Amino acid sequence: MALLLIAGVAVFTGAVVQGGVGFGLGLVAAPLITLLDPSVMPGAVQVVNMAMPLFTLAREWRRAEWRGAGWALLGRLPGSAIGALVVVYVSTATLGVLVGVMVLVAVVLTARAVSVPRNGATLTAAGFLSGITGTATGIGGPPIALVYQSARGPQIRATLALFFCVSAAQSLVILAVLDRLPGRALAAGAALVPFVVLGFAVSGPLRRYLDGGRVRTAVLAVAAVSACALLGQSLAH
């Protein structure tokens, strides 16, 4: 019960961040859950990653950019397959360090630019990278968020929610097929869903604050923290 409550606080905090920015649940929850009980990862985080977007879509689905999400999901499918192979055959620590450094470099470079080109090629590439890291580590938001950093807050949140909901379900199916989704991982994820609900419910003030022209800064900040969390989680292994 103590472990559940500790993980629940992390999920609650991540849900508040994601409710305002559009992503961030995995970056807060994944490293802590990995430390508490690595046997339920990445399945448990994928369960909450699939649940959280449903609440965002219920509120802002009209703002979703369906075409952009489609391109990202096109890249996400092969990326998820590679991420699953990483879980089985490759050290996720090595992958985490590599991707964490890449995201930090991307944040530094894009922070100096007005925007990142948002087209089929960049979205597919971001979806591919997100598929690898999301399936292997539970943290898959930064690549897509960096591409959408110049969009308005509601569009970012709704589009990322659409992408995350489908991609998390995709990752769960692939992990199950590869026999890397134990029942206790699903149970742990389900037990954490109430904390997702509570976090989303109290994220309204943050959402309104960021929509006042502060979304891009928040996206870059959360992406940088995501990279640091991924590096910390990987080096802790």
Image: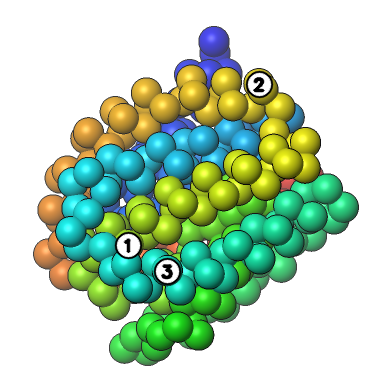
In front: 105, or 171? 171
Task: Kindly report the distance in space between the C-alpha atoms of the residues bearing marks 2 and 1.
Answer: 30 Å
For the question of whether residue 232 can be seen, the reply is no
When asked about the image quadrant of residue 145, the answer is bottom left
> Mark on residue 184?
2
**Residue 218 x, y percent position in the rendering:** 32, 63
Q: Nearer the N terminus, badge 2 or badge 1?
A: 1
Looking at the rendered structure, the kind of residue marked 3 is: Gly
Task: Kindly report the distance in space between the C-alpha atoms of the residues bearing marks 2 and 3.
Answer: 32 Å
Looking at the rendered structure, the kind of residue marked 2 is: Arg
Q: Nearer the N terminus, badge 2 or badge 3?
A: 3
Determine whether the residue tagged by mark 2 lies in a helix, strand or loop: helix
Residue contact between numbered discs 2 and 3, judged by CB atoms under 8 Å: no
Point 79% across, 55% down: residue:
85
Determine whether the residue tagged by mark 1 lies in a helix, strand or loop: helix
Q: Is 199 on the left-hand or right-hand side of 85? A: left
Residue where numbered disc 3 is placed: 70
Please determine whether, in this image, residue 120 is positioned above or below residue 236: below
> Mark on residue 28?
none
> Mark on residue 159?
1
- Quadrant of the rendering where the N terminus is positioned: top right
Looking at the rendered structure, the kind of residue marked 1 is: Thr
Task: Kindly report the distance in space between the C-alpha atoms of the residues bearing marks 3 and 1.
Answer: 10 Å
